[in-house]
Amino acid sequence: MEAAVRAVILVEELEQLAWDVLSTVNQTQAKGSTARIVVPRDPEISYRLEEVPTEDELLTAEEYLLDQGYVAPVDIGLTRGSYTITPAGLDWLDSGPPEPPIR
C-alpha cells in the first residue's frame, strides 16, 4: 500500500514540476505564444524555478509535457529539446497550478 501512495505522490510531484517548467518557459521564452520556440532544459529555466531540479527530473518533466501534448517538437535544425507550447499547454497553464500533494 505504501508503494502505491508514494507512486501517486511522485506523479503529483512530476505534474507540479512539469507545470512549473511550462509556466516558466511560457513567461521567459514563449511569452504566451504558440509560435515561439521553447527549450525546457535551458539552464535559465532551472534557475528560475523555486527548487532547482536535477537534470533527470527536468528531462522527466519535459517528457511528461510532450506525452500530455502540452508541447510539440520543433524540427528546424536547432538543439534537440526545442518545442512550441501547444494550445492545450496554454489551456493547462490557464487552469492554474495542480493541487499540491496531500501528505
Image (spheres, rainbow, N blue to C red):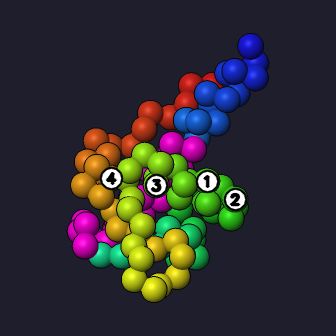
Q: Which mark is residue 29?
A: none
Q: Residue at x 70, y 27 (%)?
A: 6
Q: Give the CA distance from mark 2 to mark 1.
A: 6 Å
Q: Mark 2–mark 1 contact, CB under 8 Å?
A: yes
Image quadrant in which the N terminus is located? top right
User: Which segment did they paint magenta?
Assistant: 14-35
SS at circle 3: helix
| Image spot of residue 72 (x, y percent) | 38, 62
Q: Is residue 98 highlighted in magenta?
A: no
Q: Residue most toward the bottom?
A: 77
Q: Which residue is mark 4?
A: 89
- Of tags 3 and 2, which is closer to the observer? 3
Q: Give the CA distance from mark 3 to mark 4.
A: 10 Å
> From the viewer's perspective, is 85 left or right of 44?
left
Q: Which residue is mark 3?
A: 66
Q: Which residue is mark 1?
A: 60
Name the residue type under label 4: Gly
Q: Residues within 10 Å of mark 3 (few under 14, many from 20)?
A: some
Label whose residue precedes the other's in the sequence (3 or 4): 3
Q: Residue at x 50, y 67 (%)?
A: 40
Quarter of the image for residue 98 reads top left
Q: Residue at x 56, y 70 (%)?
A: 41
- Of tags 3 and 4, which is closer to the observer? 3
Q: Is residue 17 highlighted in magenta?
A: yes
Name the residue type under label 2: Asp
> Residue 20: in sight, yes or no?
no
Q: Residue most toward the top?
A: 1
